[in-house]
Structure formats: structure tokens, C-alpha cells
Amino acid sequence: MSIFNCVLQKAGSRIYYGLVVFLVLAFFANDVMAQDYEFTLNQRRRFDQIYVEIWAKSLNSNVKALGNASLVVQYNTNFLSPAATQSPSTTDTVINDVNIPNPIRLITSQFHLANGYNSLGAQSYSSGYYSLEINLASLGTQGIIPSSSGKGSFLGKLIFNIQGNPTSNSLTGIEGSKSNLPGDIRVFDADSNDIENRVTFTDPGNFNIVGITILYPNHEGVVVDRVQDILV
């Protein structure tokens, strides 16, 4: 075999193996990027408290119903602490019709005492980590798939008391837990398969503890941060 042919053979082998490696990496990259759900946190000021709503959205038509989940949120312990009284199953929003007598619409979680789910719970995993707990009563049966429109489905909310003396620059520090232990986020489908790696967790960004929220029914989905009796 000539030197020229040897060079061609070696070059061909390298190209072949390089192509195989590329295809394998592309396969795994596509698998990583193919997410099924998006979970988002929405913060709200409400008097001397901060409300944190958790929403879930389906990203494709092949997703499964949600099962058990520990949706752990981390927070600024200098100025926030979990409220003793939680009401995780409800929130509210504004309907963009200024002509109706009451533009406030109550939203109730479909993952609380409905569709096969037990009561929503709230649990502390140590200082700085607080979780919304979703519990499917019987794995393998029932459960629902989050909506694929808008923000998706309202899962529940957590309430934090404002404490100490936050300044105008103090932040809530609210985001999905980045801890493994304690405070690891866990998500399972209705068949008890671990689907945490199929979920994109979208953090809300910086949010000042001290501030005001202007209420106006400009468009559907603007949240209400005021008591109905004093809404004008």
C-alpha cells in the first residue's frame, strides 16, 4: 500500500469516528434540550407579606400528568420568613373588562383536592428553603397535565412574612432551590417516574421587598394585590 493510500485510509477513519462522535453528542444534546414542562415563579407584594405563585406549563403534546412534587423555593432569610398560616390553593387575577361590577377572578388550583390529588402542603427544609408539596393520592391513576396556554396551570402559592427593616434596595431572593440537600426540588409524573430533568425552572429575577404595585385592568392576567373590600 502506498503512503498516499495509507494517508487516505487514516483520514477516512478519523472522519468516520468524528462523525459518530458528532451524532452521539447531537443525540444527547437534543435529548437535554427537549423539555416537557416549564415551571415559573410569580412574586406579589401584599401588605406586609410576599406571595409566591408557582405555575406549570406543558411544552409539547407528549407530556404526562404530574404526580408528586416538592417545589422548593429559596428566599432571603434576612427579611423573609414563611408565614404561620398558608393558603396554597388559591390566588386571584383581574379580568380586563372595566365595565363589569367585579373584575376580580378567583383562581383555584386543580392540584388541590381535585383530579386525584390530596391537599396541597407547605414544608420547610431548613432556614432559607420552603416548599409547595403536591401529592397524588394514588400513583398510576388520575392526575392532570398542566395547561399549554399562557402561563399554564396555577399549581399553588407560598406566603412569606416581611421581617426586620428592609431598605428600598432589599431583595426577596426568591428563586427555585439550587440546593441538593436540604431543599432539593423533586418532580415526578403520575406513574412515579422522576421527570425533574424534563422541567425548565424559570426564576423571577430581582424583586424589591419594599415597593408599590399599581393595580389596573390593562390586560388579562394582571394580578390583584389588594383586598376586594377596599378596591376602588
Image (cartoon, rainbow, N blue to C red):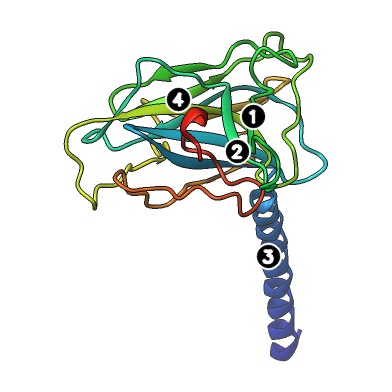
Mark closer to the chain start, 1 or 4: 1
Q: Which amino acid, mark 1?
A: Ile
Say which amino acid is labelled 4: Ser
Query: Which residue lies under the disc numbered 4?
Result: 131
Give left or right: position of 127 versus 55.
left
* Residue drawn at 65 percent across, 56 percent down: 29
Q: CA distance from mark 3 to mark 2?
A: 48 Å
Which label's residue is closer to the chain start, 4 or 2? 2
* Relative side of 110 to 181, left or right: right
Q: Earlier in the sequence, mark 3 or mark 2?
A: 3
> SS class of the residue under badge 4?
strand
Question: Where 231 falls versus 90 (above or below)?
Answer: below
For numbered disc 3, what is the local secondary structure?
helix
Numbered label attached to residue 107: 1
For the residues labelled 1 and 2, say whether their Cβ atoms are less than 8 Å apart. Answer: yes
Q: Position of residue 69 (x, y in %)?
A: 57, 24
Q: Is residue 15 left or right of residue 43?
A: right
Distance in Å between CA atoms under marks 3 and 4: 40 Å
Mark 4: give few (<14), some (14-19) or many (20+) Cα within 10 Å: many
Q: Identify the residue position indicated by label 2 in the image.
A: 93
When asked about the image quadrant of residue 66, the answer is top right
Per the image, the residue denoted by label 3 is 22
Disc on res. 165? none
Q: CA distance from mark 1 to mark 2?
A: 7 Å
Mark 1, secondary structure of its residue: strand
Q: In percent of the image, x 64 and y 24: which residue is there?
A: 109
Point out residue 172 in the picture as x, y percentages from the top left corner: 32, 42
- The residue lying toward the viewer, choosing from 225 and 203, is 225
3 or 1: mark nearer the eye: 1
Q: Which quadrant does the N terminus fall into?
A: bottom right
Where residue 38 appears, as percent x and y from the top left, is 63, 43
In this view, the residue in front, 79 or 91, is: 91
